[in-house]
Image (cartoon, grey):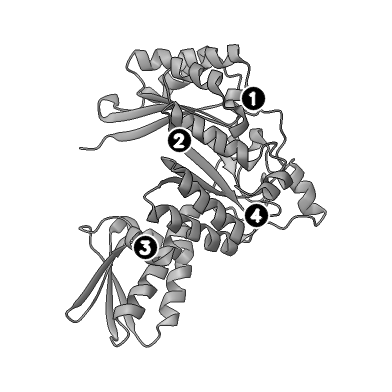
């Protein structure tokens, strides 16, 4: 029986980073402005642990929100010593953190090993130097390659975060970045569409007409191509889209851009409809009465965005009578298409082999 996976998020906003990337306002993104110290880490962990059954759970304590390895060493040690204490006591199973590619070296990684850190996530955003420069990232593509090489040499689990739709970015650059990420062989990835957040340089650029964010439809179309590239190569996609919070919503701190609280569902729903089209065109052109079977958990994806993608699909095949049924024997993100005696089953992972 698989264990439930819980993350205890500890946000260390911006303190470790001297750079002001054009898209970044960490306090807005995290929604927090706490004083984070040893006691805070212990207290926050205990709060979360009191709500779960640890016996049947895998628990990670995760330092997010800033460039963790860029903060002063003494402060790193203070926070990590609290996390290590929880690991040593068996209350927490592992430690992860997020940081920048240019804040990785032998000394830093030796320190993280000493405190039993398991996972390092790098916010690389793009593997195009023009995009990195326009976003004022303060590092180069070469810095990414060097950091990834070191992290792998030290045997950490590696996650990479990419962002689509940045200034000077385009679809071809996003696809190139995704393919390069595949070559770097991370253990997992996150995909974020760039949003215009209040009180950032990108907000100024947007208001001055110097930057146009992706529309929601454009962001979905690019993201699903990137998603399929990673899926084809068995790279785990642990998040698609920025997590919704009290501040992160259109009309609050998101000034413009492709924000949606269920962005991943839109992407996967669009892919599922594309997959059904592929099956229809390959095997069901002559059939008029068609049944689609999906898992109960998949139905919300098929009907995502008020059935927007599904309605496009049905309208495209007006000559067919299409009915949808629930079959919980199917896995999530898997469909079966039937007509008369013909039946075809396909998962998104199967489809990725043909689509990417």
Locate residue 128, reporting x and y percent: 64, 49
Query: Who's the residue at 65% across and 54% down the image?
Result: 257
Q: How many marks?
A: 4
Question: Mark 4 or mark 2, which is nearer to you?
Answer: 2
**Distance between the alpha carbons at the discs numbered 3 and 1:** 40 Å
**Distance between the alpha carbons at the discs numbered 3 and 4:** 30 Å
What element does badge 4 sit on? Answer: loop
What element does badge 1 sit on? Answer: loop
Residue at the spot of label 4: 257
Question: Mark 2 or mark 1, which is nearer to you?
Answer: 2
What element does badge 3 sit on? Answer: helix
Question: Mark 3 or mark 4, which is nearer to you?
Answer: 3
Quadrant into which the C terminus falls: bottom left
Lower sequence index among marks 2 and 1: 1
Disc 3 and disc 2 in contact, CB within 8 angstroms? no
Residue at the spot of label 1: 16
The crowding category of the residue bearing disc 3, from other C-alpha atoms within 10 Å (few below 14, some 14 to 19, many at least 20), is few
**Distance between the alpha carbons at the discs numbered 4 and 2:** 29 Å
Which residue is at the front of the view, 47 or 219?
219
Lower sequence index among marks 1 and 4: 1
Disc 3 and disc 1 in contact, CB within 8 angstroms? no
Quadrant into which the N terminus falls: top left
**Distance between the alpha carbons at the discs numbered 2 and 1:** 20 Å
Residue at the spot of label 3: 353
């Amino acid at each position: 029986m698989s264990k439930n996976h819980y993350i205890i998020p500890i946000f260390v906003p911006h303190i470790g980073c001297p750079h002001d990337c054009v898209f970044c306002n960490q306090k807005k993104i995290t929604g927090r402005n706490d004083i984070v110290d040893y006691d805070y880490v212990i207290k926050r962990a205990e709060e979360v642990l009191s709500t779960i059954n640890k016996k049947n759970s895998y628990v990670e304590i995760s330092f997010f929100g800033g460039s963790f390895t860029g903060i002063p060493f003494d402060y790193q040690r203070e926070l990590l010593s609290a996390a290590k204490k929880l690991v040593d006591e068996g209350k927490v199973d592992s430690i992860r953190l997020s940081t920048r590619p240019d804040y990785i070296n032998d000394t830093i990684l030796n320190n993280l090993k000493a405190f039993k850190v398991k996972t390092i996530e790098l916010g690389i955003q793009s593997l195009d130097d023009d995009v990195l420069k326009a976003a004022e990232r303060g590092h180069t593509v070469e810095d990414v390659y060097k950091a990834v090489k070191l992290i792998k040499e030290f045997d950490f689990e590696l996650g990479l975060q990419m962002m689509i739709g940045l200034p000077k970015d385009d679809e071809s650059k996003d696809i190139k970045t995704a393919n390069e990420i595949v070559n770097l062989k991370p253990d997992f990835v996150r995909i974020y569409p760039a949003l215009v957040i209040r009180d950032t340089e990108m907000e100024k650029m947007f208001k001055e007409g110097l930057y146009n964010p992706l529309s929601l439809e454009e962001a979905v179309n690019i993201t699903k191509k990137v998603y399929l590239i990673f899926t084809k190569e068995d790279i785990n996609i642990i998040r698609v889209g920025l997590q919704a919070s009290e501040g992160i919503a259109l009309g609050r701190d998101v000034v413009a851009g492709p924000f949606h609280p269920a962005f991943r569902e839109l992407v996967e729903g669009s892919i599922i409809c594309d997959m059904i089209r592929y099956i229809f065109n390959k095997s069901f052109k002559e059939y008029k009465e068609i049944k689609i079977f999906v898992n109960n958990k998949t139905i919300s994806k098929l009907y995502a965005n008020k059935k927007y993608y599904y309605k496009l699909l049905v309208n495209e095949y007006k000559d067919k009578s299409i009915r949808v049924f629930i079959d919980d024997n199917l896995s999530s993100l898997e469909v079966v298409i039937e007509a008369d005696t013909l039946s075809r089953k396909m998962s998104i992972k199967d489809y990725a082999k043909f689509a990417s």
